[in-house]
Amino acid sequence: MARPSFKSARVSRVEMTEIVLPEDSNQFGHAWGGRVMALIDKAAAIAATRHCRTNVVTASVDSLTFRAPVRLGHILMMYASVNASFRTSMEVGVKVLSEDPLSGLRAHCCSAYVTMVALDALGRPTPVPGLLPGTPEERRRRREAAQRRRGRLSLRSRKDRPRARRR
């Protein structure tokens, strides 16, 4: 199938806001990492869907790094957009900030790169539109996403190679 036309990176931008409630928190009053990961996945799925306008699934999450705890009652802000598109997949960058609602102070609490795959009506991978970065920042993110993809593919091909047997 031919690849659909190109789309601007702006089309995929997502801003999500959530408050950290008691059910989202552990015994220390910090948000569960898994809850934050689920929100990252949701933001990435929305961004990818906006770009390709079809169903998407998560293929991988790279470089998910928690930089600071997120406290009970704080406001989480997720910012996501497609960094690069490939044949049937897209890399979505997600940045998460935590805001203290009383002081207004914000902290970068985590970031992740999520690979999403577009699916057709039968659940098979389907081509996605190319990405037209409009700003120097978008061009840099596309270039870095391509480098990360090469690294993922290289790692995957090494894992697929048969290993020599030891005697």
Image: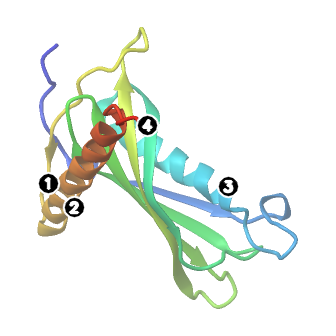
**Residue at the far top in the pictured view:** 122
Q: Give the CA distance from mark 4 to mark 1.
A: 23 Å
Name the residue nearer the viewer: 82 or 156.
Answer: 156
Which residue in the protein does label 2 denote? 141
Q: Residues within 10 Å of mark 4 (few under 14, many from 20)?
A: few
**Which residue does the image show at 20% across and 37% down from the upper left?**
86
Q: Quadrant of the N terminus?
A: top left
Mark 2 and 3 residues: CB-CB less than 8 Å, in contact?
no
Q: Give the CA distance from mark 2 to mark 4.
A: 19 Å
Position of residue 5 measured from the top left corner of the image (x, y, whole percent):
12, 30
Relative to 115, does residue 75 appear above or below in the rendering?
A: below
Which image quarter: residue 160? top left
The reply to whether residue 39 is in sight is yes
Q: Left or right of 60: which side holds 25?
A: right
Mark nearer the viewer, 2 or 4: 4
Precedes in sequence: disc 1 or disc 2: 1
- Secondary structure beneath dot 3 equals helix
Which amino acid type is shown beneath numbered disc 2? Arg
Q: Give the CA distance from mark 3 to mark 1.
A: 31 Å
Which residue in the protein does label 4 denote? 59
Which residue in the protein does label 1 denote? 133
- Secondary structure beneath dot 4 equals strand
The reply to whether residue 96 is in sight is no
Mark 2 and 4 residues: CB-CB less than 8 Å, in contact?
no
Q: Residues within 10 Å of mark 3 (few under 14, many from 20)?
A: few
**Which residue does the image show at 72% across and 67% down from the upper left?**
31
Which residue in the protein does label 3 denote? 34
Which amino acid type is shown beneath numbered disc 4? Ala
**Residue at the far right in the pictured view:** 27
Mark 1 and 2 residues: CB-CB less than 8 Å, in contact?
yes
